[in-house]
Amino acid sequence: VATLNHPSYSPDLSSPDHFLFPKVKLQLKGAIFNTIEKIQKTVTDQLNKIPTEEFSNAMKKLEIRANLYIISNGYYFE
């Protein structure tokens, strides 16, 4: 059985870090949750409020970043 190496983590390619987490974090800032279920419901509600077009735009930006990553031979950029 061949083992495939997991690619290194690159913050340049982490779309959630650039798009998703800041949006959810902004909406949840200062909130107090008494149960895991309340956290799950609140986060799910916030994710459902993000328009589909924003996800589509995030994927397009990820493709651009991936191409920059390839061109830079895996070195960090920005």
Image (tube, helix red, strand yellow):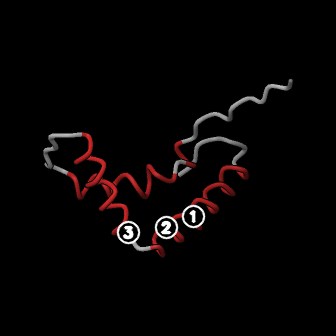
Judging depth in this view, the residue of 22 and 50 nearest the camera is 50
Total marks shown come to 3
Q: Position of residue 42 (x, y in %)?
A: 26, 55
Residue 50 tag number: 3
The residue wearing badge 1 is 59
Q: Nearer the viewer, residue 46 or 9?
A: 46
Residue linked to disc 2: 55
Quarter of the rendering containing residue 44: bottom left
Residue 3 numbered mark, or none: none
Residue positioned 19% across, 51% down in the render = 29
Left or right of residue 75: residue 71 = right
Q: Residue furthest right?
A: 1
Q: Residue 64, how many percent across, how many down?
A: 63, 62
Q: Considering the numbered disc 2 on the image, is that residue within a helix, a strand or a loop?
A: helix
Q: Amino acid at mark 1?
A: Met
Q: Quadrant of the N terminus?
A: top right
Distance between mark 3 and mark 1 Cα atoms:
14 Å
**Residue 53, above or below 46:** below
Judged from the image, the secondary structure of the residue bearing numbered disc 3 is loop
